[in-house]
Image (spheres, rainbow, N blue to C red):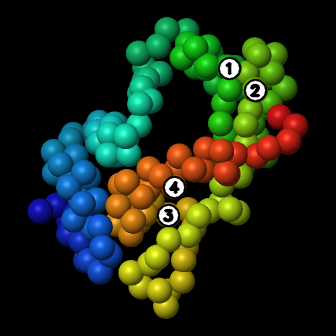
Amino acid sequence: MPSMVKTLRLAYGRSPYTEEALQVIEPPLSAGHRWLADLNTDLVTQIALALGSRASQLHTSRMSSTTADDKSERLARICAAAGEHELWAGSGTRQYLDTTALAEHKITVTWNEFTDRHPRYAQAWPKQGFEPGLSVIDAACAIGWAGVSAMLNAGLSTYRPTGEAQ
């Protein structure tokens, strides 16, 4: 058993859905990936499947015309190559994301203000309190993949900012 799986099993052993969560993430963690990017792709794919996601995974390395010296220009090209006109961005990117440059490419930015309104769920170690923004593995161990999926689906409308200028 890889040390990461052992660590997760020890940390989340009291959580009700730990084994269910590990059934999804243990195969990628045990696959012996040579490159971190391959491990990450495998984990994201398996977690997306467990959550019932219908989203497709695109790799910029397989897209044409996505290179650019300017970061905002590159983001605009990636969005265009993916056929997207909306970029969901974490609130931490407000300090450096050039929304004007993106708007010139007809890309709107929707700020994900999720952290302040993070839904809470029961913790295996309640005395330590709830820590928002941890890994999806924390939530999966606590409420199962179906619970996480329901929480995320509710969050697409509940936690998306409304009436905010973009």
Q: Position of residue 83 (x, y in %)?
A: 58, 14
Mark seen at residue 108: 2
Q: Earlier in the sequence, mark 1 or mark 3?
A: 1
Q: Quadrant of residue 79?
A: top right
Q: Amino acid at mark 1?
A: His
Residue mark closest to the camera, 3 vs 4 = 4
Q: Amino acid at mark 3?
A: Leu
**CB atoms at circles 2 and 1 under 8 Å apart?**
yes
Q: Earlier in the sequence, mark 2 or mark 4?
A: 2
Q: Position of residue 63 (x, y in %)?
A: 47, 13
- Measured in 3D between alpha carbons, the distance from the residue under mark 2 to the one under mark 1, in whole angstroms, is 6 Å
- Measured in 3D between alpha carbons, the distance from the residue under mark 4 to the one under mark 1, in whole angstroms, is 25 Å
Q: Position of residue 149 (x, y in %)?
A: 44, 50
Residue mark closest to the camera, 4 vs 1 = 4
At x 62% / y 62%, what residue is drawn?
118
Q: Position of residue 14 (x, y in %)?
A: 29, 80
Pointer 4 residue = 151
Q: Earlier in the sequence, mark 3 or mark 2?
A: 2
Pointer 1 residue = 85
Q: Amino acid at mark 2?
A: Thr
At x 65% / y 45%, what residue is drawn?
157
**CB atoms at circles 4 and 1 under 8 Å apart?**
no
**CB atoms at circles 2 and 4 under 8 Å apart?**
no
Q: State the SS at label 2.
A: strand
Q: Is the N terminus in the top left, top right, bottom left or bottom right quadrant?
A: bottom left
- Measured in 3D between alpha carbons, the distance from the residue under mark 3 to the one under mark 4, in whole angstroms, is 14 Å
Q: Is the C terminus in the top left, top right, bottom left or bottom right quadrant?
A: top right
Q: State whether residue 56 is above or below residue 95.
A: above
Mark seen at residue 134: 3
Mark 1 residue crowding within 10 angstroms, few (<14) / some (14–19) / many (20+): some
